[in-house]
């Protein structure tokens, strides 16, 4: 599968599977197993899996455009997808040394396996890089007890990439990554998901109660988890978040454009809102400018990830913060511009608005990223 085929497949899934059910799934907080099945059949679950493991071997640019295309139809499914790809990158990084990772990667490449991240914990909240859980040595592996929070695809994923402090750790960043299978004894969803936005992505807390993980499903060397979080997972996660924000912004612009074209003042010779009101045209223009600016930022980050340079870390940090803020600004403008039609859920903009706000509070939060960016500019260590 090449770039064009991947984007075409994403658009087909968005049109045929996501768009018809997005509003209902949002209302009912229903996870779309149909969407995951379609992503698997199309080959998109294996988009970034190396060709040697029967994936497409595509990079960040294809991932970003596929994710944005999905998000324009359904932000929840796009979040499920970007979490899957971010976790897949960690599994791929561990596949050379660990048989369990190789087996999972082959299934992902074949479109038969959905994975996700399980980093954040109740005890360390949005500081995803600092789990309070500690793995204990048990036979030929470890035993993990943890209270994970905000696990996208909770109860639906086939595996979870879990971070925990290594046995005998000396601090919260002395961590190791593990691949926990969904059928592991002691793994369970702790509570139902009922969020304000992204209501259909099953982002529930999960409990690991003395879950045993054999060494073959360890994804990093002991103590190397923190480094892998920052160097392997975070760039793909932040790019995915930026792409979701781009898709939500595009959806809001498209819905606002449609509303301004089709809604009319009957008492003014049936003129459209867009024709009659220059202030609404100006608002639409600002939304488009912001969205195009975000698209350029996403493309720039893809270039940095393809060819890393001295500014790459800064661009990774900036991308999520800018995307979260842009998506909130654009969807908020769409709510005001479309007025009652948006407020009463006739346009889909209200769902985009709620979904856009989720990214800003998702670790690393916008506030935390601003602090990181400031530290980077001042030459202060991030941690």
Image (cartoon, helix red, strand yellow):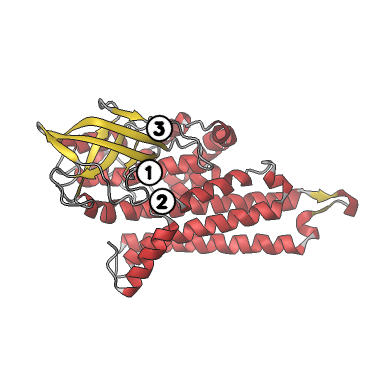
Q: Which mark is residue 134?
A: none
Secondary structure at badge 3 equals helix
Which quarter shows the N terminus? Answer: top left
Q: Is residue 48 visible?
A: no
Provide the residue designation for mark 3.
Answer: 41
Q: CA distance from mark 1 to mark 3?
A: 18 Å
Residue to which mark 2 is pinned: 240
**Cα distance in 3D space between marks 3 and 2:** 21 Å
Tag nearer the camera, 1 or 3: 1
Select label 3 or label 2 by which is in front. 2
- Residue 11 image point, x, y percent: 51, 43
> Which residue occupies 38% across, 34% down?
154
Res 166 seen here: yes
**In the rendering, at what x and y percent does residue 347 appear?**
66, 44
Callout 2–callout 1 Cβ contact below 8 Å: yes
Label whose residue precedes the other's in the sequence (1 or 3): 3
Q: Residue at x 49, y 56 (%)?
A: 324
Residue 265 as seen in the image, left or right of residue 204: right
Callout 1: 10 Å neighbours few (<14), some, many (20+)? many
Furthest toward the left, the residue is 139
Query: Callout 2: helix, strand or loop?
Result: helix
Split into 4 quadrants, where in the image is the C terminus?
bottom left
Q: Which residue is mark 1?
A: 83
Between 27 and 273, the residue placed more toward the observer is 27
Q: Position of residue 289 (x, y in %)?
A: 58, 64
Q: Is residue 180 above or below residue 78?
A: above
Give whichever of discs 2 and 1 has the lower sequence position.
1
- Give the x, y percent position of residue 346: 69, 41
Q: Residue at x 10, y 33 (%)?
A: 140
């Amino acid at each position: 599968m090449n770039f064009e085929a991947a984007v075409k497949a994403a658009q087909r899934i968005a049109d045929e599977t996501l768009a018809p059910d997005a509003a209902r799934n949002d209302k009912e907080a229903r996870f779309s197993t149909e969407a995951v099945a379609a992503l698997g059949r199309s080959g998109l679950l294996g988009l970034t899996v190396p060709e040697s493991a029967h994936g497409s071997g595509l990079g960040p640019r294809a991932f970003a455009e596929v994710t944005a295309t999905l998000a324009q139809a359904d932000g929840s499914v796009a979040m499920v997808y970007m979490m899957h790809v971010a976790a897949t990158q960690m599994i791929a990084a561990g596949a050379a040394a660990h048989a369990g990772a190789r087996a999972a990667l082959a299934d992902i490449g074949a479109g038969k396996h959905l994975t996700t991240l399980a980093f954040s914990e109740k005890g360390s909240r949005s500081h995803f890089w600092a789990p309070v859980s500690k793995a204990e040595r048990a036979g030929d592996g470890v035993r993990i007890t943890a209270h994970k929070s905000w696990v996208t695809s909770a109860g639906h994923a086939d595996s979870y990439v879990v971070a925990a402090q290594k046995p005998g750790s000396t601090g919260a960043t002395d961590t190791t990554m593990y691949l926990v299978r969904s059928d592991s004894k002691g793994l369970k969803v702790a509570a139902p998901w009922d969020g304000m936005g992204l209501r259909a992505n099953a982002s529930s807390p999960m409990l690991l109660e003395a879950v045993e993980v054999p060494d073959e499903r360890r994804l990093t060397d002991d103590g190397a988890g923190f480094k892998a979080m920052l160097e392997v997972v975070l760039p793909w996660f932040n790019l995915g978040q930026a792409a979701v924000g781009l898709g939500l912004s595009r959806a809001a612009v498209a819905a606002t454009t449609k509303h301004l074209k089709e809604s009319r003042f009957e008492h003014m010779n049936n003129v459209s809102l867009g024709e009659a009101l220059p202030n609404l045209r100006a608002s639409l223009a600002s939304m488009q400018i912001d969205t195009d600016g975000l698209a350029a930022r996403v493309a720039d980050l893809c270039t940095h990830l393809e060819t890393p340079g001295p500014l790459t870390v800064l661009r990774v940090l900036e991308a999520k913060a800018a995307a979260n803020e842009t998506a909130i600004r654009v969807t908020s403008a769409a709510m005001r511009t479309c007025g009652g039609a948006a407020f009463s859920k006739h346009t889909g903009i209200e769902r985009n608005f709620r979904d856009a706000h989720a990214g800003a509070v998702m670790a690393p939060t916008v506030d935390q990223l601003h602090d990181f960016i400031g530290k980077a500019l001042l030459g202060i260590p991030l941690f």
